[in-house]
Amino acid sequence: MIQDIGPRIFNNSYADKKAAPEDLFLAYEGDAILVREEKDKLWYPSFADFEEKYPHLREQAIFLFTIDEINYFLVKEQGLEVQGWIYVTTNRFRTEPKYWRSFAGAVGAQLNRWYEKHRFCGRCGQPTESSAKERMLYCKSCGLDIYPTISPCVIVAIHDGDRLLLTKYTGRAYKNYALIAGFVEVGETLEDGVRREVMEEVGLKVKNLKFYKSQPWPFSDSLLAGFFAELDGDDAITLQEDELSLGVWLHRDEIPPAESHISLTSEMQEAFRLGRNISAL
């Protein structure tokens, strides 16, 4: 999955670091990021690459994280122009075969959204400031502390013997098969979220929920919790059509092999298709 970047090591411990010329930076414009594309690979700029034209970039750069010994910083200035560097959509991260590159860019985009959304205090409207001690924004005026937003989300693979329920989204660019998924509501357990989402989206009941694995999903600021669950009773599907365009039961032999291993959804479908022992979870 996208976070599986080993043997490289991702370290998101916050530090009040100052950028050096050799450090890399991530710069975003809306849903686009500044990169150089070379032989189907993404490269991120170092401050040295832009120092001649933009000597001030390091002054306001915000430290993000390290991968191995490489420091990554966030640069807020937009419209950066140096020959060979272009802005590409962050959807590119979904197809980048080198996961450590896509993971860095996607997590950086998540943190960039958080900084952008909290430039002003949500309680009193005054500008916020960054803490020098931790990843936190605070308001001097009213004392509000603001930490990065992470939303819990459930994904459930509903199975009935050798059949798996697969769906397709309505109105999304992603056209492959997917599993039932949704955000957990206030006051709701993960398990209750599974049962509610399944009933809302396909009108089914489930039982014997088994937790499979979790995944950070920076594209939607989420932490995904994957479950396998058995069908409980009638298998007739009632689609929530504003969310789903298709819901179908497929035998494991009919499930197409995963085209990508970037997501928890794909891994869970593949685990069922290959007949891994779900009951042993």
Image (cartoon, rainbow, N blue to C red):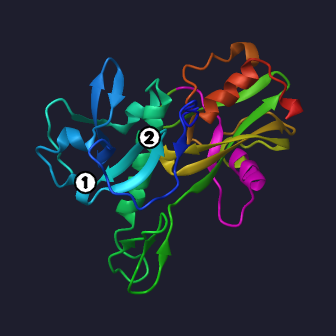
Percent across and percent down for residue 173 are: 43, 33
User: Along the horizontal axis of the image, is 175 left or right of 184?
Assistant: left
The quadrant holding residue 232 is top right
> Label for residue 58?
1
Residue at image coords 11%, 45%: 53
Residue at which label 2 appears: 104
Give the mark toward the camera: 1 or 2. 1
- Locate the C terminus by quadrant: top right
Q: Is residue 28 above or below residue 230?
A: below
Amino acid under label 2? Ala
Q: Residue furthest left?
A: 53
Between 235 and 182, the one lying in front of the other is 182
Front position in the image: 52 or 182: 52
Residue most extreme to the top = 253
Q: Looking at the image, which residue is at 62% across and 28% down?
A: 266
Residue at position x 43%, y 70% in the image: 131
Q: Which residues are magenta?
A: 176-198
SS of the residue at dot 1?
Answer: helix
The residue that appears at 72% across and 35% down in the rendered structure is 237
The N terminus is located in which quarter? top right
Between the C-alphas of marks 1 and 2, the distance is 19 Å
Residue type marked 1: Arg
Quarter of the image for residue 171 reads: top left
Q: Position of residue 204 (x, y in %)?
A: 77, 42
The spot of residue 219 in percent (x, y) is: 47, 44
Residue 108 shows in this picture:
yes
Q: Is residue 123 above or below residue 259?
A: below
Secondary element type, mark 2: helix
Rate crowding at label 1 as few (under 14), some (14 to 19) or many (20 or more) other CA atoms within 10 Å.
many
The mark found on residue 183 in the picture is: none
Q: Does 189 lie within the magenta span?
A: yes
x, y (%) of residue 207? 86, 43
